[in-house]
């Protein structure tokens, strides 16, 4: 819970800072997303329960419909029984980057978007006390995403979407190294503002 409050505080400060810096720009946008994560396979031998997460994204539009983006995300899964023990939590945190294509759908106040890019994340294993018992270290993965963007007026957009993310890492628990593949299907909703 402390990490979640810290994350929300950091995102809030970044939003205020980017609003000040980017107020004269019409090509910069920020977005906050939250959603539900579904692991598509076991993590090692851990059957992950449905997870949830938050993402903060900053974008710069360099062509009429194309932007480059970067951000940070936190996603949490629980597991009743795993290679790391019973009732452990798995947190995937790190950075996201890539390209976004955003295009209007006719004359409606509705766009569609496609994103593709990478992630530079790590996976932490936490016990029921919130102590980190193992960490995979950061590594590269990939993601693809698509959805709709509803124009809310005053440069605000509501952006529901679906995403697929994949990350492969090694993690050591009790001197035993386990190769883990975290592949996740995510449904989320974001709110963004362009400056």
Image (spheres, grey):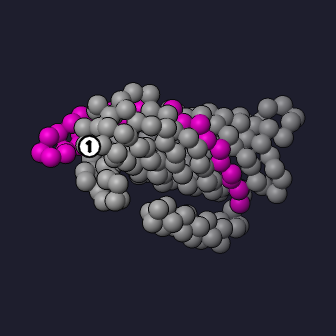
Residue segment shown in magenta: 170-195
Question: Is residue 173 at least partly visible in the picture?
Answer: yes
Which x, y percent locates residue 38? 49, 34
Q: Residue at x 37, y 48 (%)?
A: 89
Q: Residue at x 29, y 37 (%)?
A: 82
When asked about the image quadrant of residue 48, the answer is: top left
Question: Which residue is outermost to the left?
Answer: 175
Question: Is residue 167 at least partly visible in the picture?
Answer: no
**Nearest the eye: 50 or 108:** 50
Q: Secondary structure at mark 1?
A: strand
Magenta span: chief secondary structure: strand
Q: Is residue 58 above or below residue 150?
A: below
In the picture of the structure, the residue carrying the numbered disc 1 is 85
Give yes or no for residue 194 being in the magenta stretch.
yes
Give yes or no for residue 118 being in the magenta stretch.
no
Apparent side of residue 60 relative to residue 70 in the rendered image (left or right): right
Which x, y percent locates residue 67? 60, 45
**Nearest the eye: 52 or 80:** 80
């Amino acid at each position: 819970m402390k990490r979640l409050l810290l994350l929300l505080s950091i995102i809030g400060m970044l939003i205020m800072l980017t609003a000040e810096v980017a107020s004269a720009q019409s090509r910069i946008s920020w977005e906050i997303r939250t959603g539900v994560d579904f692991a598509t396979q076991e993590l090692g031998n851990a059957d992950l329960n449905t997870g949830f997460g938050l993402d903060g994204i900053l974008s710069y539009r360099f062509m009429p419909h194309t932007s480059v983006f970067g951000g940070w995300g936190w996603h949490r899964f629980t597991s009743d029984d795993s290679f790391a023990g019973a009732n452990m939590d798995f947190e995937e945190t790190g950075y996201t980057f890539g390209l976004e294509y955003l295009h209007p759908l006719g004359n409606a106040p509705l766009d569609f978007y496609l994103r593709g890019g990478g992630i530079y994340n790590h996976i932490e294993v936490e016990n029921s006390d919130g102590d980190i018992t193992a960490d995979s270290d950061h590594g590269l993965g990939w993601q693809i995403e698509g959805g709709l963007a509803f124009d809310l007026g005053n440069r605000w957009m509501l952006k529901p979407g679906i995403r697929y993310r994949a990350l492969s890492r090694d993690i050591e628990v009790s001197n035993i190294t386990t190769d883990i593949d975290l592949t996740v299907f995510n449904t989320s909703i974001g709110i963004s503002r362009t400056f």
